[in-house]
Every structure is written in structure tokens, then in C-alpha cells.
Amino acid sequence: MKNEKNIIAFLKILLKKYIDFLPKKMYNRNDILLYRFNNFKNRFGVLMRRITIEDVAKKAGVSKGTVSAVMNAKKTVKPETRDQILKVMKELNFRPKGVARNLKNGTQDKSIGIIIKDLNYSFYTTIATGVADYAKTKGYSVIVASSENDHESEIKFTHLFSTKDIKGAIIAPLVEGSSEIEHLFKLKMINYPFVLLEDVKGIQANVVAIDNIKAIKKAVKYLIDGGHTKIVHFAGPPASSHTEERIEGFRYAFSESSLVFNNDMIVSIGSRHEESYSNTMAYFKSRPRSEYPTAIVCFNDQQALSVITALKELDIKVPDDISIIGNDDVAYAKLYPVPLTTISAPQYEIGRRAAEILIKNIESHTLLPPERVILQTELIIRESTRAINKKD
Amino acid sequence: MKNEKNIIAFLKILLKKYIDFLPKKMYNRNDILLYRFNNFKNRFGVLMRRITIEDVAKKAGVSKGTVSAVMNAKKTVKPETRDQILKVMKELNFRPKGVARNLKNGTQDKSIGIIIKDLNYSFYTTIATGVADYAKTKGYSVIVASSENDHESEIKFTHLFSTKDIKGAIIAPLVEGSSEIEHLFKLKMINYPFVLLEDVKGIQANVVAIDNIKAIKKAVKYLIDGGHTKIVHFAGPPASSHTEERIEGFRYAFSESSLVFNNDMIVSIGSRHEESYSNTMAYFKSRPRSEYPTAIVCFNDQQALSVITALKELDIKVPDDISIIGNDDVAYAKLYPVPLTTISAPQYEIGRRAAEILIKNIESHTLLPPERVILQTELIIRESTRAINKKD
DNA sequence: AATAAATATTTAATCGTTTCAAATATAATA
DNA sequence: TATTATATTTGAAACGATTAAATATTTATT
């Protein structure tokens, strides 16, 4: 207490010096102080004792038990006592610590988490929906975390889940280069149940994934059978194993045909709209019409839409001049300006299966051996592709 | 222990009776037992003592401290001891309780939660992205929960967040009828910081929202100024206050014009694709061409797309026959078959502001008075609307 | 006024880890 | 062998609430 006063005094001095760093007059003087105080505390680890139920009890002149009773809406508390306690709680801005509340009689609520890569990409949110629907039938709530393709975030979330008594996690892992997977090993050590949505080299774990390689092979074969010879792949973001596998599938398809693969057929254009749009523009502007491909296999539907938009701009007709194949079959792919030929992944099913395995593991008393489920994709033919019959 | 054996014996009997309910031979005999056991336990509340660090310590012949050291990767543990402990942990399938781990030295990680209504609706995921981006600058992680328009889920999630030491929550509240808001009062009682994304009658809290009424008024006025007289509003899902406010705005717009409003102008068609598509079909098939409206103000862009799709099917031209206005300005609205005229809501900004207020509250030592922020929208005119000059 | 019954409050044990000073074992050195 | 340094392990005290049992207080009943 006394120490706290000293710190405040000290801070007042600091404030005079650093007042200009404050966010524009959003706070009144008092709040400025507290705001700074918090910042300072966080930055320099000056610990301020947390307000506990005991403080409230003392100030209100009752026992901890009574305060607890108020918080839990027990009807045994006399109204006047109750009011007094509530008042003190407000005054002290008392925030009971959730974990402590649940320590004694382990919380009832069952919940699992899913870590996806991109919150605004329907591929992942559809998976999450599959997870949520299945989980609900088993009485579990689902919370979603998105790493937004940041490996550090992924680590943070695995830690968060496992320390907050979220019972298990489904993870779309970021596998970059030789990939840091220490956090996954940590989970394994504490027997924390989890399911991966992509294979991760070096770790034995439950996996539910799609067969990207076969998927792309199918798409390429369809184009080759349709008479296409000048085919390219517009690849996705570098750090993704989806990107890698799709490239591999593309390459692989050629080994089974009479055409030969070469590296110029892989064009990395990303999948964010602005990025892939401008990369597409650049690609076509930098080469003569005679060198245009007749077909493009896109990384995903989102990217395909950007490509189609760019092509329209360039006055290249789809599919007359160039055929386009997407990937994912998102909900609105059939509504594109040109209804999109694409590879449909069973996103919802992925989520469902992953949730199923996860919950089985959560509820098992013994450590279960890892499972591996690979789901197949389907080529959905719409209007963005056409066969070429005249060889040129 | 002995009791546990009895239960297993009892279960064996039960099993004989209910063996047919088991999932198709996925488990070996032993697992079947455990699987059923868990089910049984959950269903009838037979509590099986949880495996604790003490069990591990005892079985491994060491103290709790040593086991803890292993779990926390301290380097002071002799390798053989470590291995032995890890082995026992696996054998017992020991899962340390997260909350207990964090009890002593309050977890470092700072996290906030957001409860949205629909994980697959970009309006909300964009808000969440705004939240996440701002939160990140303050060192907070964000987890997302989606109520999927289920009020019970919303309640569950508020409880989940507050008891898992998620530091605060941003909530897109479901306000149905006279609305159950007890859970929000509970949060207030424990001074749990939260921000609402819509006004909720009867509760004083932080709110960051958009001005739906003004938004729709603007849209309707634009149509009326363009000479439209037969305007209808395709309303959204019933339980949403967005739906209500938009209807109100629509109605209100007429009171400021020379046209008169009547209830037939409000058509409830929902916002899920299948639903709004078929409702649109039904709407037009059930009336003669002469009674078609010349303009439709849609609940949101998603719905607008379904409507446009249906109209195409019916061979009604947009905007030549009917003008369409959306709502939200989602990322792909400009790429629609007919680039969509729509009302742009500052989704990202909503998220940012909400996060800002939330974190300010979290970090304040005193209880701050509630804030209310109403953000304005903008009418984005594209190609799905046109003016009518000939009066008919 | 005495007693019983109903209400309200306190006390003390408890949840399952982590922490860290002290104890002990082991290895290195004189 | 005794001494010192180093490596391991132990064990009790936290952490911050909840809860059942014990106690105190008020109200009702005779």
C-alpha cells in the first residue's frame, strides 16, 4: 500500500517527462495517471497486488464466504449486506480471478479450440463450422483463433488453449521451412489432445487433411485431356504447405503425361486480392500474346477471382482465350462473373472428422494412437474452362 | 480405486445391453470400455478422480516438485528421472490442469474474446480482424466465438470467457424480444470489461455500433430522388436488431418523403443463400409483372447476391428492370455479376474502436463510465441501381 | 421468556499446480 | 579422507476463489 503510493509519486515525475506520449486527450487527468501506471507496470514488471476477494471482504466488514455468496447469487445473503458488498466490489473494481473460481470444483463447461490461418477465408471458417456443429452434438463449445499466418501467434494460441483448460485443439499448422514445432511437442508432453489439419513433418499426431496432390493432378489431367498444352499454375503464399503440395501435384501431373514440366510454369502470385490482381496484370503485360498460357490452375478460388478480374481488364476472355480452374469451391464460386470450374474440398467434413477424433481423444482415459485421415476432393466443372480441339 | 473397479464391473453389464450403440468397430475391446465409461460418467455424473501431479509423482517415486520441473522444461532434472517421469505421465495419460498451473503466478498472456453471430459472414470477421489488429499492438491475443444466432451459445461464451481469465469481451448481442440479458448483468457484477456491438435495451454498457437507421434512410432517399416510387425492403433474419433497425430506417425514410409507407413494402426473406434465393423466387412468381417493385433495398450484400441470382433466373434485368441496393460493402461486392450499389459500414473501424475501449477498461484500475460510439455509413454507388426518369 | 425454526455469516478445508529455499546426493578437489 | 562445489530433489507455502459444516443472529411459536 505504502509502496504503491511511492510508485504513484514516482510516476507523476515520469509523467511530466513523458506526457507527450499520451494518446490525444482521450483521458481525464486521473485516467492518464492510471493509464500510464499500467503501461509502466507492464513494461517494468512493477507488480501491483491484485485485488482479491479478501480485500472486498475486509473493506465490507464481512467474510470471504459472504462475498462469494453474493457473486454466485446465492439467496442466503441479507439484502443490505449484499448491497454493501456490491458497492465495495465496484469501488475496488474487483474482478474475481476466473481460474481461481473454477479451481475447486472443476468447471462444467466443455470447450475445444481451433486455430485457423485466416479468419476471412471461407475455407477455414467452413471447417470451423463443421467442427462447431459436431462439437455441439457432444456438448462442447468451440472457440476460434486465427494465426493470420503468423507463426508466433500460433504458438501463443496453443499455449493459451492448453493453459486455459480448453480441452483440446484443432490446428491448421504453419509449417515454415524446417518449421518450429516445439510448441507441438510441448502439447504432446502434457498429453494435450490435438488434431492437425495438415501433415507436419517430424511429429506423430492426429491429422485430418485433404489430398492436395491428387486434387491438382486431377485438374491438370482434365486440362490436358481437353487439349491444353500451355498450362501454368498460379501458386499461393510461400509459407503454406498447401502451396507446396499443390505445386507438387501440378508438377507430378506432367510426369504422367506426354508434356514436359518446367519451372516457368509455376508463377507465385499470392492469394490476397490486391497482390494476386497486380501480379496477374504484371504477368500478362510482360509477355507477348503468343506466349500466353491457354489455361491457369489457380491456388484457390479467392485468387481465381482476382485473376479473372485482371483478365477482364486486359480484355482476355475466360474461357475462350484462357481456361481457369480454382480450388476450394467456396460458396460463391458458382456465382462468379464466369461460374468457376474448381476443385471442391470437403471443408465441412474435414471439420467434422477432426472434431470427432479430437473429442474421442479428450474423452479417452488412455492415450490413443494417432489417426490419419486423408479426404478426397472433387473436380467441379463449370464455365470457366473449355476444351481446345485445334492444336496450335 | 476399489469403487472404480465396481463401476467398471457394473459397466461391463451395461455394455452387454448397449453394445449395439457403439460406434462401428473403431475401438478395440479395451477402448470400447473406456469410451462407454466416459459416456456413462458424463451422463450420470459418476465422478472419477482426476489424475493429478501427485499420482504421477507417487508412481514415479519422486516429489511433485520434480514432476513440475519436468513439465516446465527446467534443466535441473536428471535425464533418467526426466524420462521416467515422462513415461509415467504417458501411462497415466496425465493432463495437468491448466487453471491450476496458472493460479500461482497469474498467467502472463493477455487475451480478449469476441462473440460474433456468424462465422461465415464477412461483416463480422472483418470486425474481428479490426479487433485483432488493434489488440496485437497492445499485446493482446484475440479469440473468436460465434453464437451462430443462438442465444444459449452467447450465454455460454460470456461465461466461458469470464471464467477462463480472458480479460474482456466484445459482444455482438442477440437481442430477442424482451431479451434475456441476465448474463450481461452477471458480467457487470463482477466488473468484467465488455463492449457491445449493438445497443441492448436495459443495460448500461460500452457500445460501438453503426447507425443503421440513417444508413437505410440514405439509401431510400437516393432511390426516391432517382425517381423510384415502387420500393421494397427485403428484410433479414427476425432475431436481429440489425434487421429491426433497418426496417425502421426504411419506414422512417418515407415519412420524410412524399411517398407513403405500407407494410407490404417489408418482405422478410432471411439472409442465408438458399432461403433468400427461394423466397425471392416465390415473391416474384406470386405477383404479376405490373406489381413488381422498381427497386429493392436488401438487408445485406450476401442477401443481395442471392436476390440478383434469382432475378437472373427470372430474366429480370438489374438494374434495368429493378435496382438493387446491398448493405455492408463486403470485399467481393464490387466483383458481383453486377457490381453492387451498397452501404459501406466501417467494419474494421468498428472492431478497432471496440478493442480500444475494451482494453482501456481492462487496464484501468478504476471502473470507467460506459462509452457509446456510433459510426456512420456511406452509400457506395455502383452499377446495380439506376435512376428512373419516366414516371409510370 | 424460553425454545424452536429460519436466516445469515464465518470458519476452515479444499482444488492442483508452481515456486524456491533448504536438504541431500554426487562429483571434484585438495 | 575431508572439504568444497555442483547437481538433484524435496516439501511446505503460496495462488484466490468455493463450499460444507459450524456458528451466530433473527424471527416465529408456545
Image: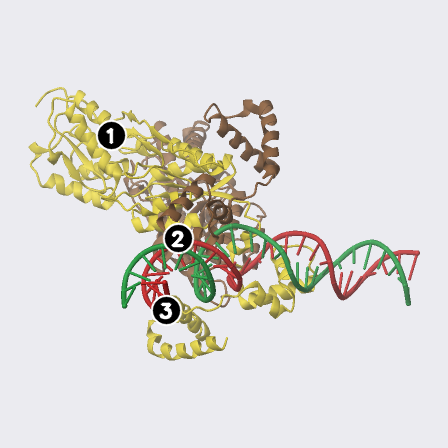
Chain colours: A brown, B yellow, C red, D green
Q: Nearer the viewer, residue A93 or A357?
A: A93
> Which amino acid type is marked by label 3?
Phe
> Which amino acid type is marked by label 2?
Asn
- Which of the two marks, 1 or 3, is nearer to us in this view? 3
Left/right of residue B342 with respect to residue B9 in the rendered view: left
Residue underneath mark 3: B44
Q: Nearer the viewer, residue B211 or B286?
A: B211
- Which of the two marks, 3 or 2, is nearer to us in this view? 2
Residue B368 appears at what percent x and percent y?
A: 43, 34
Residue underneath mark 1: B213
Q: Which mark is residue A72?
A: 2
Give above or below for A30 relative to A189: above
Kind of element beneath mark 2: loop
> Which amino acid type is marked by label 1?
Ile
Kind of element beneath mark 3: helix
Q: Where, quadrant-wise, is the C terminus of chain B in this rendering?
A: top left
Kind of element beneath mark 1: helix
